[in-house]
Amino acid sequence: MYSLLFKSFFRTRIFLISLVLLITVGVISILIGKQYLVKQEKAILAAQEFQQKSIERNLDYHNDDLGLLLYYLRFTLIKQPSNIGAISIGQSDVNPLLQAVTIRGLEGQKYDTDFENPSLLMSGNLDLGFVIIYLFPLVLIAMTFNLYSEEKELGTWRILTAQTSGKAKFLLKKLGIRILFVFAILIFLLLLANGVLSIPMNENFWAIFLQSILYVFFWSSLCLFVVSFRKNSSFNALALISIWVVLTVLIPAMVNNYVLNTYQVPEALEAMVEQRDGYHEKWDMEKDATMTGFFEAYPQYKGYTVPEEEFSWIWYYGMQHMGDLAAEETSNEMMEKVMLRNTVSEKVALFIPTMHAQLSFNSVAGTDMIGHLEFLKGLKEFHEGLRVNFYPKVFDNNPADSVDWQNHAAKFYKPTSYVNWVYILMPTLFIVVIMGTLALLNLRKL
């Protein structure tokens, strides 16, 4: 029976179309991921080279004034790229891979990013995660919507059931062959991506691998559930496509609209304006008003004198720091609201496998918003380290030669990697079990 079902399936047009479509689009998505990694490598090399040349060039002009030199010099923090991010690019196409900052106010700098083509951002990236989440379900629907109705409509159902031990078992065998075919392509593409993108086979890769398997199982059980009602082909096709639209487009859009309106985030521009206002207003104030707040933040510098009638770098950088303090509340509020948005989305996604798969892919790949917020926290620590390191030298009027500039090459930030297996696998597995059980109960009526 299995050999006949295999031969029958392999001779259908849908088999050939699905094979060509999935392999072609899958390979293209992997190559797009490869281009994404190459772009990252080029950006990192360019940033490292620029920082070195920038230091050398500015040393020639401002060697005698370290405070002025540090006004211009930018120091780069690079988020350590992970090759697995090419599978699910997520939000990393809009969030910067690296940040170059001076020791001046941070809030006016940390939201700088590259210019991107808006039309490309609107359409998104055709990565492998996109292919798995959106295209694989459509192929499954195309191969299974007439699993039962085709035999019924062609008048071969009675003949087939007379030659088999059970009607439900026959349908399950037909479904099993189609699922095995989809799984074979899925595993092939994931292993191909592993080789082409040089992804290590660590827990992050296996998390995406198992989530992909469960996601295909979900759509397989859903297709079986709809087929188990034994409706005609038109009804099945319309029902499954409608469910696909609801799960992949409508619900995610509704959730996104809800969190955007419920947790309205103050714009990054607002924090930048507050930082600049907080800094610029200090020019018209008594110096004591600036230095009191600065010395509270850095009591180790209280021993330095601040000239009242002339410009001094300790006063200037004190003003820059006070500008950051003026924007601190808005900046923290923005971070908290973004975290709330993400938390709400994750809770809703526990019941929506399409959303859960997308968020899981991005989280494991380190291309989600949480990963970017962690990078911004690392940038703040990096910036603070620069300040603490350079302030004493600037305030002591040391020359630029007193700094070992070899130690100030571009630095790397290594994201923390942790896979929450229960969160990633259990929600989809739970829904698969429920959906599969209901489908089998319906098939028993045959």
Image (tube, helix red, strand yellow):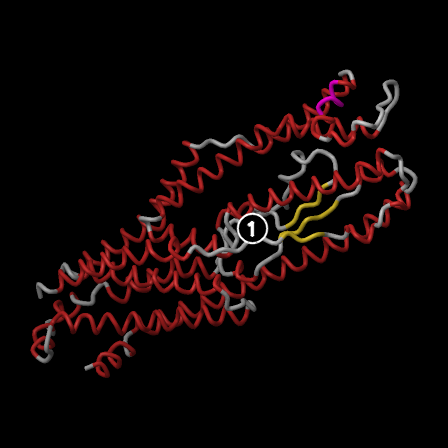
Q: Is residue 372 above or below residue 216?
A: above
Q: Nearer the viewer, residue 381 or 68?
A: 381
Residue stretch rendered in magenta on the structure: 289-293
Q: Position of residue 194 (x, y in %)?
A: 51, 69
Q: To which residue does mark 1 refer? A: 93
Q: Is residue 64 magenta?
A: no
Q: Nearer the viewer, residue 260 or 440?
A: 440
Q: Main secondary structure of the magenta part?
A: helix
Q: Is residue 292 magenta?
A: yes
Quadrant, the C terminus: bottom left
Q: Quadrant of residue 303?
A: top right
**Where residue 263 sits in the image (x, y, percent)?**
44, 32
Q: Residue at x 28, y 55 (%)?
A: 241
* Quarter occupied by the N terminus: bottom left
Q: Position of residue 276 (x, y in %)?
A: 68, 27
What residue lies at 59% left-to-right and 62% top-to-bottom?
35
* 297 to the left or right of 349: right
Relative horizontal placement of residue 207, taking residue 303 as reference (left or right): left
**Which amino acid type corresponds to the residue marked 1 in the rendered image?**
Asp
Q: Is residue 159 above or below residue 378?
A: below
Query: Along the line of sight, which residue is nearer the eye, 17 or 144?
Result: 144
For the residue carrying disc 1, how many other residues have a C-alpha within 10 Å: few (<14), some (14-19), or many (20+)? some
270 lies above or below 180: above
Q: Residue furthest bottom?
A: 3
In which image quadrant can residue 274 be found? top right
Placement of 228 over or under 281, stated as above or below: below
Residue 259 in the image, given as x and y percentages of width and height: 41, 36
| Residue shown at 62% from the left, 56% from the top | 80
